[in-house]
Image: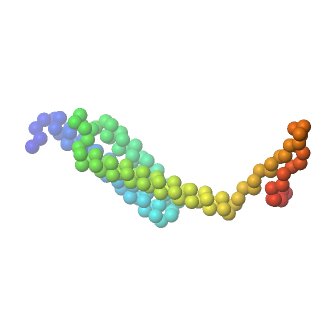
Amino acid sequence: MLSTPSEHDAVRNLGELETALGAVELELAALGQALQAHDPAATETAANALHRALQRAVERFGHQASPQGVPLPLRRRLAMAGGRVAAQREAVHRASSALDRAIDVLLPTPPQPIDLYGASGQAARRGSSGYAEA
């Protein structure tokens, strides 16, 4: 039974921390679904919502964590959420890199022509890249 105002505050703070962390977990799940669906608009919306939820959670944890620290179950959930964020960030990075490589294959950039210099330092002739220039 809670008897002091500080105990009531601690329980209320714990509930607010759990709510904030729950919102982060829900937004992480929404972002994961959007990424799996390859839906850019939904991915951007989910990423923005996750960003807002993370900001609220950081504020709550910064202001309302008890002097004894965050309880172990919440710390574990927070660590799991952090791991999921890192995994999704890595998945987005891999997908972006794969897209960049595909674009490089489909639209190669012509190599820069090499200027050849004579003994006097003047350009003797312009190298040929093999690409026609318009």
Residue 22 in the figure: left or right of residue 117: left
Please say which color scheme the image uses. Answer: rainbow
Query: How many numbered tags mark residues here?
Result: 0
Q: In which quarter of the image is residue 117?
A: top right
Residue 92 in the figure: left or right of residue 68: right
Identify the residue at horizontal 17%, vertical 35% (top origin): 6
Asked if one can make out residue 79 in the rendered structure from this viewpoint, the answer is yes
Residue 27 in the figure: left or right of residue 124: left
Q: In which quarter of the image is residue 63?
A: top left
Q: Position of residue 33 (x, y in %)?
A: 43, 62
Identify the residue at horizontal 10%, vertical 38% (top origin): 3
Image quadrant occupied by the C terminus: bottom right
Residue 1 in the figure: left or right of residue 6: left
Q: In which quarter of the image is residue 118?
A: top right
Q: Which of 42 and 79 is in front in this view?
A: 79
Q: Where is residue 38 in the image (x, y as percent from the top left)?
A: 50, 64
Identify the residue at horizontal 30%, vertical 50% (top origin): 77
Q: Which residue lies furthest to the front in this view?
A: 119
Asked if one can make out residue 46 in the rendered structure from this viewpoint, the answer is no
Q: Nearer the viewer, residue 54 or 77?
A: 77
Q: Nearer the viewer, residue 40 or 83?
A: 83
Q: Position of residue 64 (x, y in %)?
A: 28, 37
Q: Where is residue 32 in the image (x, y as percent from the top left)?
A: 42, 59
Image quadrant occupied by the N terminus: top left
Identify the residue at horizontal 55%, vertical 56% (top origin): 96
